[in-house]
Image (tube, grey):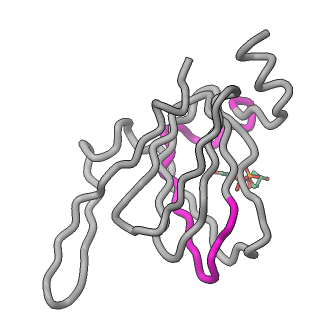
Amino acid sequence: MNTVDNVNLVDIPKVHDERGFLAVIEKDVIPFAIKRVYYLYDVPTESSRGGHAHKEQQSVIIALSGSFEVVVDDGKTKKRVMLNKPNQGLYIPTHIWREIDNFSSGAVCLVLASTAYDEAEYIRDYRVYKNQLFG
Ligand code: TYD
């Protein structure tokens, strides 16, 4: 099963010139084929998003604008990661619990996902999550 050690930062190649930066997400940058892209915006600072794990979905989370923190948890160990660079993503494999909080004003949280949306592959109850991992 995946652990927080399998969660890692992904650098997104960028091109810079005097007109600004251009970041490119191509096939080899993300460790899965992207099936869906969604994003969170206008998130109140006190909001906590996420609060689930996935049986099938792998994700890469990117702070396209502003900043927020992602807490990843494998049922034993938790890690808090701040995202604040539009050219850096956080790869989260399956079976990792995640929560996202401390959204800055104007933050945009982009999620690249390996699956189509399917509520049946979510685990939204932390006790169920722990039970599935450790019985
Ligand atoms: P939710 O999973 O609670 O968002 P977060 O990951 O921030 O906790 O999703 C909020 C609502 O949006 C919920 O009713 C499911 C719906 N939703 C879709 O319809 N399609 C999607 O691709 C996603 C990610 C969510």
Residue found 76% across the figure and 59% down from its top: 48
Q: Is residue 13 above or below residue 116?
A: below
Q: Which of the 4 image quadrants contains residue 75?
A: top right
Q: Quadrant of the N terminus?
A: top right
The foreground one among 80 and 63 is: 80
Q: Is residue 81 above or below residue 103?
A: above
The picture places residue 7, in percent across and down from the top left corner, at 48, 37
Q: Nearer the viewer, residue 76 or 36?
A: 76
- Left or right, 103 with reference to 81: right
User: In which quadrant of the rendered view does residue 8 lie?
Assistant: top left
- Residue 93 shown left or right of residue 68 in the figure: left
Give left or right: position of 55 versus 92: right
Range shown magenta: 101-121
Residue at 82% x, 33% y is 126
15 over 10 or under it: above or below:
below
What residue is drawn where x is 15% and y is 90%?
18
| Vertical placement of residue 67 versus 128, above or below | below
Depth check: 12 or 67 in front? 67
Is 98 contained in the magenta span? Answer: no
Residue 88 placement (x, y as % from top left)? 37, 59
Q: Residue most toward the top?
A: 135
Residue 128, percent across and down?
83, 24
